[in-house]
Amino acid sequence: MTDGSDTNRPVAIVTGASSGIGLSAAKALAEHGFTVVCVSRGNGAGAQVVERLRAETGSSGLHYLPADLSRPREAVALASAFRERFGRLDVLVNNAGAFVPGRVVTDDGLELTFALNHVSTFALTLALLPELRAAGGRVVTVSSNAAMGARLQLDDPTSERRYSGWSAYAWSKLCNQLFTAELARRLEGSGVTANAVHPGFVATSFGHVGGPMGGLVRLAQRLFGRTPERGADTVVWLASAPEMRGRSGGYYVDRRERPFAPRARDEEAQRRLWSLSEALLERAGVPIQWPADADQSGLRSPSHRAAAVP
Ligand SMILES: NC(=O)c1ccc[n+]([C@@H]2O[C@H](COP(=O)([O-])OP(=O)(O)OC[C@H]3O[C@@H](n4cnc5c(N)ncnc54)[C@H](OP(=O)(O)O)[C@@H]3O)[C@@H](O)[C@H]2O)c1
């Protein structure tokens, strides 16, 4: 352990920090005095962005770790790389996400949107649980109001039967909320909190998919989108505000608590998604699970049936 233990600064990870909301959140957290570990795909702009943020903020506490989070295996490797250099984790911002217009299947047999937006979020959070517990940390997951109209696809999580980019995206964002609610329940009394956020409609690279649709998204963003700084505001507030210490299990829009999407409030669905996510990870050769000795180590261990992968 080197980087994180040099100082008493709190430590944050921000996934998807190479652009948009994640970049703004990383910058703001660095300005709030956090050591910030920025994550994005290694072939992207991430490393240069971190150089630029160092210059802009004057912070020496900005670091870069690459991971392709469409592969849960890389999410777990990221957690190991983090562990080697930093001992504690005060804030995990699960922000990396994408809209994918046509169905793409990853090497793990997962649909890309679901793999990136949900499965790796699940895997990374569970893999970092010891570091979060060491700090009494906060998990902030960037969901979306797109979840409001989402179908519950527990019987077809990777959209094999029918695919539309928007439905897959909305389902993945519903998963962010189902996951947050179940995680918060399991973490009750542990000192670690979990909340989800809708950042608003934000002018970022999100949805820049080319073709007429990409053009429409760019136009709408220019006309109606808020700035990435504004989009990151509630994320940063959940991650750092003293008044949010200990508050868990909520969904926030513009610093106000709002109800989860209707289908995210179903506790049975929350438990089933959890169980399914563990099963999918096991199938992908990444057997990461809620600690078996949860009850002895101050965590909750809700009873649930093991799910078969549909
Ligand atoms: N923009 C909006 O209006 C809006 C509204 C509601 C919710 N959201 C949510 O906000 C979050 C951030 O989106 P944004 O608007 O800031 O979009 P963005 O500008 O496109 O940023 C997406 C970030 O995710 C990273 N990323 C993409 N694929 C990745 C992968 N396979 N592995 C690791 N990182 C990956 C990208 O980095 P690289 O490409 O460099 O890897 C980038 O840093 C998403 O979860 C999105 O669903 C956005």
Image (cartoon, grey):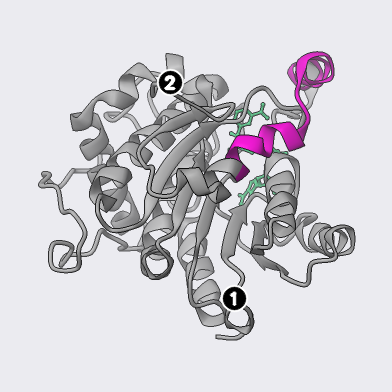
Task: In the rendered view, tell whether residue 43 sits above or below residue 279.
Answer: below
Q: Secondary structure at mark 2?
A: loop
N-terminal of the pair, mark 2 or mark 1, is: 1
Residue at 63% across, 83% down: 6
Q: Position of residue 74 (x, y in %)?
A: 52, 63
Q: Is residue 238 left or right of residue 7?
A: left
Q: Position of residue 3 (x, y in %)?
A: 64, 80
Question: Mark 2 and mark 1: span between their CA atoms?
Answer: 50 Å
Task: In the rendered view, tell whether residue 259 sits above or below residue 249.
Answer: above
Which quarter of the rendered picture does the N terminus lie within? bottom right
Q: Nearer the viewer, residue 62 or 219?
A: 62
Q: Secondary structure at mark 1?
A: loop
For residue 162, which numbered disc appears in the image? 2
Any part of residue 115 in sight: no
Any part of residue 286 in sight: yes
Task: Please give the count of numbered marks on the rendered protein.
Answer: 2
Q: Nearer the viewer, residue 88 or 310?
A: 88
Residue extending farthest to the front is: 243
Q: Quadrant of residue 104?
A: top right
Q: Nearer the viewer, mark 2 or mark 1?
A: 1
Q: Is mark 1 within 8 Å of ligand 1?
A: no
Residue type pointed to by label 1: Asn
Q: Is residue 105 left or right of residue 305?
A: right
Residue at 37% across, 40% down: 180
**Residue linked to disc 1:** 8
From which residue to which does the magenta span run?
213-236
Residue at 89% across, 63% down: 55
For residue 278, which numbered disc appears in the image? none
Quarter of the render that holds ligand 1: top right
Q: Is mark 2 within 8 Å of ligand 1?
A: no
